[in-house]
Image: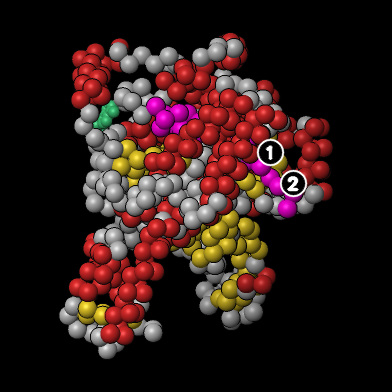
């Protein structure tokens, strides 16, 4: 660094306020002096500019000065808060930024294990026993060339004395473009980074971070065949974990005034619902569900440490070509921190999280999956049924507790997945069969199904009147583009309303009448089950769903007081979803067991009956039961042949039945 610039820097770091702060930092055993770029800029513009242009030089000199002042090795100057407009998008980093001090924003997707990095290595000469200290500056490990002992001066050999060497903490990270910057479903770009000393483990995967640092490059390829291309690594100076609510900055005072004005509009609810996916025709209930999902409600932390989630999960299933994917993409696009992915591809870490090999450190690192990245927002997951087996084991935890625990390859961590999930699943047989239950045709574990607050089945049934209006709607779209589907609220404004509501409104549940309405609904529906043989139509899970949806309804009205109408709307939506999804197609009765266990009560009765028939036949036919006979007897009692055949297949797979000869079955355990 030039002597004149160095003088200025000396002066800057010797200001009284800085010295005071340094004493405080040293007293706490910390090592980093954090200053905002503004302070540097106010002090001297040229000095600030030299940080941006020659950061390595600048920071090395600064660290030296700080070590001199505090007499503590390893003191660091960290600069944060560059002007927001100079933040570079990860995908826009170009050769011009190499060697420069830059600021980038992203989501931390990986944080490697913290490793000790040598800062000063001590080598013992095998010939004379002299201990040589070698400062480890630069990026590669350095050994002494010759022994320092003037009487020796030989080229070693040397032994590294680990216990006398000095180390500092080191960690490799990877950040990815934030989902909201990825409108239009582009693949996110990534940037590797390295962080040292007391800034390791500052952030965990899933955190939104603002990083400053020096962009450096390292040659690719092995030693013999070096390439001309280099890989980028950000040497991180400062990490700021952006709190939930950063989006609030997007709202201008005029926006807020407009939103408050809208809050008085009696038609606000309808206006919002009509603005959901306006180019898609119909599906009013689904649009209402998505609107409620976008507004959401706060989670409740109970005194005993458990937590009731506030996010609503919605599952869409049904025939192909009914705009499921289209709706999902729209929702991910409008939601703050929204993300669209497919269960099949997702990111490298899938939907949840994975321990992966890290290129820079060679060790294991934790990589955040889609749900972690969407923390604090909404995750649209298409082809949900195709999620990878690793994901299906942790998806339950991430839907209900909204965390993911990873204990793999020596990494133990808990990541947050506080996001609403809008999933779409395709039925097993292509089209949705009317007379089969959801659990029979959506290839998802019933336990996972039961975690969704609302499930909708979208059928593509020809209906002349509806078809004509829909065709007209779609054709008009093509003719006039956006002119026809002018939603009551503009997309950008809708996003602002959502941001505003989520940050400023936490509806209180203290309306007696609203509470009673929900209570009555719950008790009445349960009473049906109590009275006799009827299957259980509703569980506590649905009760919680209704509470969540009620509060979301309140928030959607831009209010924080729950009303009876909010409760009634929530109940109606849950009823609708239950009727679609929870219907037992054998009896036509509403049966929550269809969701919870995948088997309706009538079905369980039938299973028991068929197994009894097999037992009876075994007695008559000397230990084996002819399949034809089973089908005949079951049929005479009204149990369908396809049901019996499917059951026998499944029981064979489970090992409960086997086939000693063609057309005969016998129970494994009698
Ligand atoms: P899915 O994911 O359910 O198989 P897609 O979202 O890929 O279906 O939809 C197929 C196409 O049909 C899309 O271009 C979509 O816009 C259109 N489409 C289907 N139903 C509607 C509808 N109700 N209104 C407008 N467009 C629709
Ligand atoms: Mg699709």
Residue placed most toward the observer, 463 or 176: 463
Residue pointed to by mark 2? 68
Residue pointed to by mark 1? 34
Q: Is residue 341 visible?
A: no
In the current view of this chain or complex, which residue is farthest to the front? 636
Above or below, 285 relative to 453 = above
Q: Is 498 colored magenta in this rendering?
A: no
Above or below, 456 relative to 499 = below
In the current view of this chain or complex, which residue is farthest to the left? 662
Q: Residue at x 67, y 22 (%)?
A: 42
Residue placed most toward the observer, 483 or 209: 483
From the top left corner, tell me how far across and down residue 415 is, in percent. Answer: 56, 52
| Image-based side of 279 in relation to 270, left or right | left
| Image-based side of 511 in relation to 265, left or right | right
From the top left corner, tell me how far across and down residue 177 is, in percent. Answer: 44, 38
Question: Could you say whether the residue bearing mark 1 is in a helix, strand or loop?
Answer: strand
Q: Quadrant of the N terminus?
A: top right
Q: Is residue 531 visible?
A: yes
């Amino acid at each position: 660094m030039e002597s004149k610039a160095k003088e200025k820097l000396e002066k800057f770091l010797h200001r009284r306020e800085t010295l005071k702060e340094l004493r405080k930092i040293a007293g706490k055993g910390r090592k980093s002096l954090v200053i905002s770029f503004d302070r540097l800029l106010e002090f001297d513009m040229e000095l600030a500019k030299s940080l941006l242009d020659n950061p390595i030089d600048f920071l090395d000199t600064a660290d030296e000065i700080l070590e001199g002042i505090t007499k503590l090795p390893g003191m660091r100057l960290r600069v944060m808060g560059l002007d927001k407009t100079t933040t570079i998008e990860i995908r826009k980093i170009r050769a011009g930024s190499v060697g420069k001090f830059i600021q980038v924003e992203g989501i931390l997707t990986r944080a490697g294990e913290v490793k000790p990095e040598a800062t000063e290595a001590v080598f013992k000469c095998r010939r004379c026993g002299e201990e040589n200290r070698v400062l480890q500056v630069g990026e590669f490990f350095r050994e002494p060339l010759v022994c320092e002992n003037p009487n020796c001066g030989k080229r070693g050999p040397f032994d590294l004395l680990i216990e006398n060497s000095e180390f500092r903490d080191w960690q490799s990270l990877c950040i990815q473009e934030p989902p909201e910057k990825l409108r239009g479903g582009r693949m996110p770009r990534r940037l590797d980074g390295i962080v040292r000393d007391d800034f390791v483990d500052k952030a965990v995967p899933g955190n939104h971070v603002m990083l400053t640092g020096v962009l450096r490059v390292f040659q690719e390829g092995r030693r013999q065949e070096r390439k001309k291309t280099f890989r980028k690594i950000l040497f991180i100076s400062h990490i700021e974990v952006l709190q939930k609510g950063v989006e609030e900055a997007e709202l201008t005072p005029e926006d807020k005034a407009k939103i408050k004005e809208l809050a008085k509009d009696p038609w606000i609810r309808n206006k919002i619902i009509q603005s959901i996916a306006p180019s898609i025709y119909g599906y009013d209930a689904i649009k209402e569900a998505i609107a409620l999902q976008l507004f959401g409600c706060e989670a409740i932390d109970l005194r005993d440490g458990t937590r009731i989630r506030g996010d609503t999960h919605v599952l869409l299933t049904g025939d192909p070509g009914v705009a499921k994917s289209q709706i999902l993409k729209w929702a991910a696009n409008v939601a703050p921190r929204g993300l669209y992915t497919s269960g099949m591809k997702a990111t490298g870490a899938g939907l949840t999280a994975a321990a992966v090999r890290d290129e820079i450190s060679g060790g294991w690192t934790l990589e955040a999956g889609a749900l972690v990245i969407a923390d604090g927002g909404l995750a649209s997951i298409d082809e949900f049924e195709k999620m990878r087996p690793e994901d299906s084991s942790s998806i339950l935890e991430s839907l209900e507790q909204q965390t993911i625990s990873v204990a793999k390859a020596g990494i133990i961590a808990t990541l947050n997945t506080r996001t609403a999930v809008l999933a779409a699943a395709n039925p097993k047989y292509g089209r949705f069969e009317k007379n089969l239950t959801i659990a029979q045709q959506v290839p998802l574990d019933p336990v996972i199904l039961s975690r969704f607050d609302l499930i909708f089945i979208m059928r593509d049934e020809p209906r002349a009147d509806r078809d004509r209006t829909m065709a007209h709607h779609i054709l008009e779209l093509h003719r006039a583009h956006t002119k026809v589907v002018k939603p009551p609220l503009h997309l950008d404004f809708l996003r602002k309303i959502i941001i505003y509501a989520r940050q400023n409104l936490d509806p209180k549940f203290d309306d007696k009448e609203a509470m009673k309405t929900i209570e009555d609904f719950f008790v009445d529906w349960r009473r049906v089950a109590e009275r006799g043989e009827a299957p259980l139509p509703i569980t506590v899970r649905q009760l919680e769903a209704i509470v969540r949806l009620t509060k979301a309804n309140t928030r959607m009205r831009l209010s924080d007081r729950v009303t009876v109408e909010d409760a009634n709307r929530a109940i109606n939506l849950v009823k609708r979803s239950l009727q679609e999804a929870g219907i037992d197609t054998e009896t036509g009765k509403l049966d929550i067991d269809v969701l919870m266990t995948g088997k309706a009560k009538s079905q369980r009765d039938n299973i028991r009956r068929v197994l009894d028939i097999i037992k009876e036949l075994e007695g008559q036919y000397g230990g084996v039961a002819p399949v034809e006979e089973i089908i005949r007897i079951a049929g005479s009692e009204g149990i369908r042949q396809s049901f019996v055949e499917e059951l026998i297949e499944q029981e064979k797979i489970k090992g409960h039945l086997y086939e000693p000869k063609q057309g005969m079955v016998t129970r494994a355990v009698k």
